[in-house]
Image (cartoon, rainbow, N blue to C red):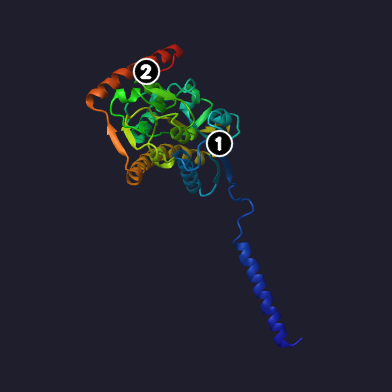
Amino acid sequence: MSKINANIIIKNIFLLTATVFISILFLPPANVQAKPAITLTYANFPPASTFVCVQMEKWKEEIEKKTNGTVKINTFPNGTLLSAKNMINGVINGQADIGCLCMAYQPGRFMVTNALGLPFGFKDAKSGTIALIEIFKKYNPEEFKNVKVIGLFTNAPANIYSKKPVTSLKDLEKMKLRASGGIADVITALGGNAVGMPQSDTPEALQKGVVDGAVSSLETLMDLNYSELCREVTILNGPLYSFAVVMNLKKYNSLPNDIKKIFEDFMEEHSMWTAEYMDAHVEDSISWSMEKYNITINQFNDNETTEINKRVEVLFEEYIKDTIKEKIPG
Protein backbone atom coordinates (compact mmCIF):
# COMPACT_ATOMS: atom_id res chain seq x y z
CA MET A 1 0.00 0.00 0.00
CA SER A 2 1.36 3.39 -0.90
CA LYS A 3 2.07 6.00 1.71
CA ILE A 4 -0.54 8.34 0.18
CA ASN A 5 -3.31 5.71 0.30
CA ALA A 6 -2.45 4.85 3.89
CA ASN A 7 -2.71 8.50 4.90
CA ILE A 8 -6.12 8.80 3.23
CA ILE A 9 -7.39 5.69 5.03
CA ILE A 10 -6.09 6.90 8.38
CA LYS A 11 -7.67 10.32 7.81
CA ASN A 12 -11.06 8.76 6.93
CA ILE A 13 -10.94 6.53 9.99
CA PHE A 14 -10.16 9.55 12.19
CA LEU A 15 -13.08 11.56 10.75
CA LEU A 16 -15.46 8.64 11.18
CA THR A 17 -14.35 8.09 14.77
CA ALA A 18 -14.73 11.80 15.58
CA THR A 19 -18.24 11.85 14.08
CA VAL A 20 -19.31 8.84 16.12
CA PHE A 21 -17.78 10.33 19.29
CA ILE A 22 -19.59 13.66 18.81
CA SER A 23 -22.90 11.89 18.13
CA ILE A 24 -22.56 9.86 21.33
CA LEU A 25 -21.57 12.97 23.27
CA PHE A 26 -24.84 14.70 22.43
CA LEU A 27 -27.12 11.76 22.99
CA PRO A 28 -29.35 12.07 26.10
CA PRO A 29 -28.33 9.85 29.03
CA ALA A 30 -29.88 6.39 28.96
CA ASN A 31 -31.99 7.09 32.07
CA VAL A 32 -33.48 10.38 30.70
CA GLN A 33 -36.50 9.96 28.45
CA ALA A 34 -38.52 12.53 26.51
CA LYS A 35 -41.76 13.46 28.22
CA PRO A 36 -44.55 11.47 26.57
CA ALA A 37 -47.37 13.41 24.93
CA ILE A 38 -50.76 13.47 26.67
CA THR A 39 -53.56 13.26 24.11
CA LEU A 40 -57.02 14.49 25.12
CA THR A 41 -60.33 14.51 23.25
CA TYR A 42 -62.56 17.60 23.43
CA ALA A 43 -66.22 17.29 22.38
CA ASN A 44 -68.46 20.20 21.40
CA PHE A 45 -71.96 20.35 19.95
CA PRO A 46 -72.39 23.46 17.71
CA PRO A 47 -70.86 24.01 14.25
CA ALA A 48 -67.17 24.90 14.09
CA SER A 49 -67.88 28.53 13.11
CA THR A 50 -69.78 29.38 16.33
CA PHE A 51 -68.18 31.21 19.24
CA VAL A 52 -68.49 28.10 21.41
CA CYS A 53 -66.20 26.21 19.04
CA VAL A 54 -63.94 29.19 18.36
CA GLN A 55 -63.14 29.28 22.09
CA MET A 56 -62.47 25.52 22.00
CA GLU A 57 -59.85 25.92 19.26
CA LYS A 58 -58.30 28.88 21.09
CA TRP A 59 -58.08 26.83 24.31
CA LYS A 60 -56.48 23.94 22.42
CA GLU A 61 -53.93 26.28 20.83
CA GLU A 62 -52.99 27.97 24.10
CA ILE A 63 -52.81 24.77 26.17
CA GLU A 64 -50.58 23.06 23.62
CA LYS A 65 -48.34 26.14 23.63
CA LYS A 66 -48.25 26.49 27.42
CA THR A 67 -47.36 22.80 27.87
CA ASN A 68 -44.69 22.94 25.14
CA GLY A 69 -46.52 20.29 23.18
CA THR A 70 -46.77 17.81 26.04
CA VAL A 71 -50.57 18.03 25.85
CA LYS A 72 -52.23 17.41 22.48
CA ILE A 73 -55.94 18.16 22.05
CA ASN A 74 -58.14 16.52 19.40
CA THR A 75 -61.32 18.58 18.94
CA PHE A 76 -64.73 17.34 17.78
CA PRO A 77 -67.26 20.10 16.91
CA ASN A 78 -70.82 19.79 15.65
CA GLY A 79 -71.83 16.85 17.86
CA THR A 80 -69.47 14.44 16.09
CA LEU A 81 -68.38 12.89 19.39
CA LEU A 82 -71.10 13.88 21.88
CA SER A 83 -74.44 15.65 21.41
CA ALA A 84 -75.51 18.67 23.47
CA LYS A 85 -77.79 16.76 25.84
CA ASN A 86 -75.34 13.86 26.27
CA MET A 87 -72.33 16.08 26.92
CA ILE A 88 -71.81 15.90 30.68
CA ASN A 89 -72.77 12.23 31.00
CA GLY A 90 -70.48 11.39 28.08
CA VAL A 91 -67.58 13.14 29.80
CA ILE A 92 -68.33 11.44 33.13
CA ASN A 93 -68.42 8.05 31.35
CA GLY A 94 -65.17 8.73 29.51
CA GLN A 95 -66.55 8.95 25.97
CA ALA A 96 -64.67 12.25 25.77
CA ASP A 97 -61.98 13.62 28.06
CA ILE A 98 -63.35 17.17 27.83
CA GLY A 99 -66.73 18.54 26.80
CA CYS A 100 -68.44 21.90 26.47
CA LEU A 101 -72.05 21.94 27.65
CA CYS A 102 -74.87 24.45 27.60
CA MET A 103 -76.56 24.27 30.99
CA ALA A 104 -79.86 25.66 29.68
CA TYR A 105 -80.40 22.39 27.82
CA GLN A 106 -80.85 20.64 31.19
CA PRO A 107 -82.49 23.26 33.42
CA GLY A 108 -83.49 20.87 36.20
CA ARG A 109 -79.95 19.55 36.52
CA PHE A 110 -78.10 22.87 36.67
CA MET A 111 -80.43 25.03 38.73
CA VAL A 112 -77.75 27.10 40.48
CA THR A 113 -75.80 28.19 37.41
CA ASN A 114 -78.97 28.45 35.31
CA ALA A 115 -80.01 31.41 37.47
CA LEU A 116 -78.49 33.51 34.67
CA GLY A 117 -81.35 32.26 32.50
CA LEU A 118 -83.48 34.77 34.42
CA PRO A 119 -83.89 38.28 32.96
CA PHE A 120 -81.38 40.17 35.10
CA GLY A 121 -80.71 42.66 32.31
CA PHE A 122 -77.06 41.88 31.63
CA LYS A 123 -75.89 43.97 28.70
CA ASP A 124 -73.01 41.80 27.52
CA ALA A 125 -71.30 38.42 27.83
CA LYS A 126 -68.44 39.83 29.90
CA SER A 127 -70.63 40.87 32.84
CA GLY A 128 -72.56 37.60 32.59
CA THR A 129 -69.36 35.55 32.62
CA ILE A 130 -68.04 37.39 35.68
CA ALA A 131 -71.33 36.66 37.47
CA LEU A 132 -71.25 32.97 36.44
CA ILE A 133 -67.70 32.49 37.73
CA GLU A 134 -68.59 34.16 41.04
CA ILE A 135 -71.73 32.01 41.44
CA PHE A 136 -69.64 28.89 40.81
CA LYS A 137 -66.96 29.90 43.31
CA LYS A 138 -69.48 30.81 45.99
CA TYR A 139 -71.78 27.78 45.76
CA ASN A 140 -69.57 25.05 44.23
CA PRO A 141 -72.70 23.40 42.76
CA GLU A 142 -73.25 19.74 43.57
CA GLU A 143 -74.09 18.93 39.96
CA PHE A 144 -70.42 19.35 39.00
CA LYS A 145 -69.00 17.02 41.67
CA ASN A 146 -68.23 14.23 39.17
CA VAL A 147 -66.26 16.40 36.73
CA LYS A 148 -63.50 19.00 36.81
CA VAL A 149 -64.69 22.40 35.60
CA ILE A 150 -61.99 24.05 33.47
CA GLY A 151 -64.02 26.83 31.84
CA LEU A 152 -67.14 28.94 32.44
CA PHE A 153 -68.68 31.61 30.22
CA THR A 154 -72.00 32.92 28.90
CA ASN A 155 -73.23 34.09 25.55
CA ALA A 156 -74.44 37.64 24.95
CA PRO A 157 -77.96 38.58 26.11
CA ALA A 158 -81.02 37.65 24.07
CA ASN A 159 -82.61 40.39 21.98
CA ILE A 160 -85.52 40.46 19.54
CA TYR A 161 -85.17 40.48 15.77
CA SER A 162 -88.28 40.51 13.65
CA LYS A 163 -89.84 41.40 10.30
CA LYS A 164 -91.88 44.24 11.80
CA PRO A 165 -90.83 46.78 14.46
CA VAL A 166 -91.30 45.91 18.14
CA THR A 167 -91.35 49.06 20.27
CA SER A 168 -94.08 48.15 22.75
CA LEU A 169 -95.55 45.14 24.52
CA LYS A 170 -98.62 45.47 22.29
CA ASP A 171 -96.37 44.92 19.27
CA LEU A 172 -94.86 41.88 20.98
CA GLU A 173 -98.24 40.34 21.81
CA LYS A 174 -99.11 40.10 18.13
CA MET A 175 -95.99 38.14 17.19
CA LYS A 176 -94.86 34.53 17.10
CA LEU A 177 -91.18 34.45 18.01
CA ARG A 178 -88.76 31.54 17.99
CA ALA A 179 -87.46 31.21 21.54
CA SER A 180 -86.24 28.46 23.83
CA GLY A 181 -85.50 27.81 27.51
CA GLY A 182 -85.53 30.82 29.81
CA ILE A 183 -85.93 33.12 26.82
CA ALA A 184 -89.24 31.47 25.93
CA ASP A 185 -90.39 31.93 29.54
CA VAL A 186 -89.65 35.66 29.30
CA ILE A 187 -91.51 36.08 26.01
CA THR A 188 -94.53 34.24 27.45
CA ALA A 189 -94.47 36.38 30.60
CA LEU A 190 -94.47 39.48 28.42
CA GLY A 191 -97.56 38.28 26.55
CA GLY A 192 -95.81 37.12 23.40
CA ASN A 193 -96.09 33.78 21.63
CA ALA A 194 -92.93 31.74 22.04
CA VAL A 195 -92.42 29.01 19.43
CA GLY A 196 -89.89 26.31 20.24
CA MET A 197 -87.72 24.95 17.43
CA PRO A 198 -84.05 24.24 16.73
CA GLN A 199 -81.98 27.22 15.66
CA SER A 200 -81.26 25.44 12.36
CA ASP A 201 -84.98 25.37 11.47
CA THR A 202 -85.55 29.07 12.10
CA PRO A 203 -84.56 30.53 8.68
CA GLU A 204 -87.10 28.33 6.87
CA ALA A 205 -89.76 29.10 9.51
CA LEU A 206 -89.16 32.82 8.93
CA GLN A 207 -89.43 32.44 5.16
CA LYS A 208 -92.70 30.49 5.44
CA GLY A 209 -94.21 32.83 8.04
CA VAL A 210 -94.36 30.14 10.75
CA VAL A 211 -92.67 32.71 13.00
CA ASP A 212 -92.42 36.49 12.74
CA GLY A 213 -89.00 36.72 14.30
CA ALA A 214 -86.77 35.22 16.94
CA VAL A 215 -85.12 36.02 20.25
CA SER A 216 -81.42 35.26 20.53
CA SER A 217 -78.01 36.82 20.97
CA LEU A 218 -77.28 39.07 18.02
CA GLU A 219 -74.23 37.37 16.52
CA THR A 220 -76.80 35.20 14.70
CA LEU A 221 -77.79 38.22 12.57
CA MET A 222 -74.53 37.70 10.68
CA ASP A 223 -73.55 34.10 11.43
CA LEU A 224 -76.94 32.72 10.36
CA ASN A 225 -77.83 35.66 8.10
CA TYR A 226 -81.05 36.37 10.01
CA SER A 227 -80.77 40.06 9.19
CA GLU A 228 -81.70 39.29 5.59
CA LEU A 229 -85.22 38.39 6.75
CA CYS A 230 -85.43 40.37 10.01
CA ARG A 231 -84.55 44.02 9.50
CA GLU A 232 -85.89 45.16 12.90
CA VAL A 233 -83.95 44.59 16.12
CA THR A 234 -85.28 45.47 19.58
CA ILE A 235 -82.99 45.55 22.59
CA LEU A 236 -84.39 43.43 25.41
CA ASN A 237 -81.22 42.38 27.27
CA GLY A 238 -82.92 39.13 28.11
CA PRO A 239 -81.57 35.90 29.60
CA LEU A 240 -78.13 34.46 29.02
CA TYR A 241 -77.12 30.90 28.23
CA SER A 242 -74.44 29.58 30.58
CA PHE A 243 -71.72 27.23 29.35
CA ALA A 244 -69.23 25.03 31.20
CA VAL A 245 -66.17 23.22 29.93
CA VAL A 246 -65.81 20.06 32.00
CA MET A 247 -63.19 17.31 32.16
CA ASN A 248 -63.43 13.66 33.13
CA LEU A 249 -62.36 13.60 36.78
CA LYS A 250 -60.26 10.45 36.54
CA LYS A 251 -58.43 11.79 33.51
CA TYR A 252 -57.83 15.14 35.19
CA ASN A 253 -56.49 13.49 38.35
CA SER A 254 -54.08 11.43 36.23
CA LEU A 255 -52.39 14.56 34.86
CA PRO A 256 -49.00 15.64 36.23
CA ASN A 257 -49.25 18.43 38.79
CA ASP A 258 -47.57 21.00 36.53
CA ILE A 259 -50.16 20.34 33.80
CA LYS A 260 -53.02 20.59 36.31
CA LYS A 261 -51.67 23.96 37.41
CA ILE A 262 -51.63 25.21 33.82
CA PHE A 263 -55.28 24.17 33.39
CA GLU A 264 -56.26 25.82 36.68
CA ASP A 265 -54.37 29.05 36.07
CA PHE A 266 -55.75 29.41 32.54
CA MET A 267 -59.42 28.88 33.44
CA GLU A 268 -60.51 32.43 34.25
CA GLU A 269 -58.20 34.04 31.70
CA HIS A 270 -59.65 31.96 28.90
CA SER A 271 -63.24 32.34 30.14
CA MET A 272 -62.89 36.12 30.00
CA TRP A 273 -61.22 35.93 26.57
CA THR A 274 -64.28 34.00 25.36
CA ALA A 275 -66.70 36.58 26.75
CA GLU A 276 -64.77 39.46 25.19
CA TYR A 277 -64.59 37.63 21.88
CA MET A 278 -68.36 37.10 22.00
CA ASP A 279 -69.09 40.76 22.72
CA ALA A 280 -66.79 41.92 19.92
CA HIS A 281 -68.41 39.44 17.55
CA VAL A 282 -71.88 40.78 18.39
CA GLU A 283 -70.71 44.31 17.59
CA ASP A 284 -69.27 43.09 14.29
CA SER A 285 -72.56 41.33 13.52
CA ILE A 286 -74.61 44.48 14.16
CA SER A 287 -72.28 46.63 12.05
CA TRP A 288 -72.32 44.10 9.22
CA SER A 289 -76.14 43.88 9.31
CA MET A 290 -76.52 47.65 9.29
CA GLU A 291 -74.20 48.01 6.31
CA LYS A 292 -75.59 45.10 4.31
CA TYR A 293 -79.31 45.20 5.17
CA ASN A 294 -79.79 48.60 6.83
CA ILE A 295 -81.36 47.09 9.95
CA THR A 296 -83.02 49.31 12.56
CA ILE A 297 -82.19 49.12 16.27
CA ASN A 298 -85.22 49.85 18.48
CA GLN A 299 -85.48 50.47 22.23
CA PHE A 300 -88.40 50.16 24.65
CA ASN A 301 -89.21 53.49 26.31
CA ASP A 302 -89.08 53.94 30.10
CA ASN A 303 -92.76 53.14 30.64
CA GLU A 304 -92.53 49.94 28.61
CA THR A 305 -89.35 48.94 30.45
CA THR A 306 -91.06 49.42 33.81
CA GLU A 307 -93.93 47.21 32.67
CA ILE A 308 -91.51 44.58 31.37
CA ASN A 309 -89.72 44.41 34.72
CA LYS A 310 -93.07 44.07 36.50
CA ARG A 311 -94.24 41.21 34.27
CA VAL A 312 -91.05 39.14 34.64
CA GLU A 313 -91.07 39.28 38.45
CA VAL A 314 -93.08 36.05 38.44
CA LEU A 315 -90.11 34.22 36.89
CA PHE A 316 -87.86 35.16 39.81
CA GLU A 317 -90.56 34.10 42.27
CA GLU A 318 -90.93 30.72 40.58
CA TYR A 319 -87.17 30.19 40.56
CA ILE A 320 -86.93 30.92 44.29
CA LYS A 321 -89.78 28.48 45.00
CA ASP A 322 -88.03 25.78 42.95
CA THR A 323 -84.71 26.25 44.74
CA ILE A 324 -86.39 26.08 48.14
CA LYS A 325 -88.19 22.92 47.08
CA GLU A 326 -84.93 21.33 45.92
CA LYS A 327 -83.07 22.66 48.99
CA ILE A 328 -80.39 24.36 46.93
CA PRO A 329 -79.09 27.95 47.14
CA GLY A 330 -81.07 30.39 45.05
Q: Residues within 10 Å of mark 1 (few under 14, many from 20)?
A: some
User: Neighbour class for label 2 at 10 Å: few (<14), some, many (≥20)?
Assistant: some
Q: Quarter-wise, where is residue 178 in the image? A: top left
Judged from this view, the residue extending furthest toward the front is 208
**Please, what secondary structure does the residue beneath circle 2 have?**
helix
Task: Name the outermost residue toward the right.
Answer: 1
Q: In which quarter of the image is the N terminus?
A: bottom right
Seen from the viewer's position, the closer of residues 124 and 170 is 170
Residue 64 shows in this picture = yes
Q: Residue 44 carries which label?
A: none
| Kind of residue indicated by mark 2 | Leu
> Which numbered circle lies on residue 79?
1
Kind of residue at disc 1: Gly
Q: Where is residue 29 in the image (x, y as percent from the top left)?
A: 61, 55
* Residue drawn at x 32%, y 40% as measured from the top left: 295
Query: What is the C-alpha distance between the residues marked 2 and 1?
Result: 32 Å
Quarter residue 254 falls in? top right
Report the residue marked by disc 2. Answer: 315
305 vs 115, nearest the viewer? 305
Residue 123 in view here: no
User: Which residue is located at x 62 percent, y 64 percent?
Assistant: 23
Image coords of residue 251 (percent x, y): 57, 35
Q: Which of marks 2 and 1 is nearer the N terminus?
A: 1
- Secondary structure of the residue carrying tag 1 is loop
Q: Position of residue 248 (x, y in %)?
A: 56, 32
Q: Residue lying at the far left in this picture: please name it.
A: 302
Q: Is residue 221 above or below residue 143?
A: below
**Nearest the camera: 4 or 54?**
54
Residue 92: image location, x then y, percent? 57, 29
Task: Please name the residue shown 44% across and 21% down the image.
Answer: 111
The C terminus lies in which quarter of the figure?
top left
Viewer-nearest residue: 125 or 256:
125
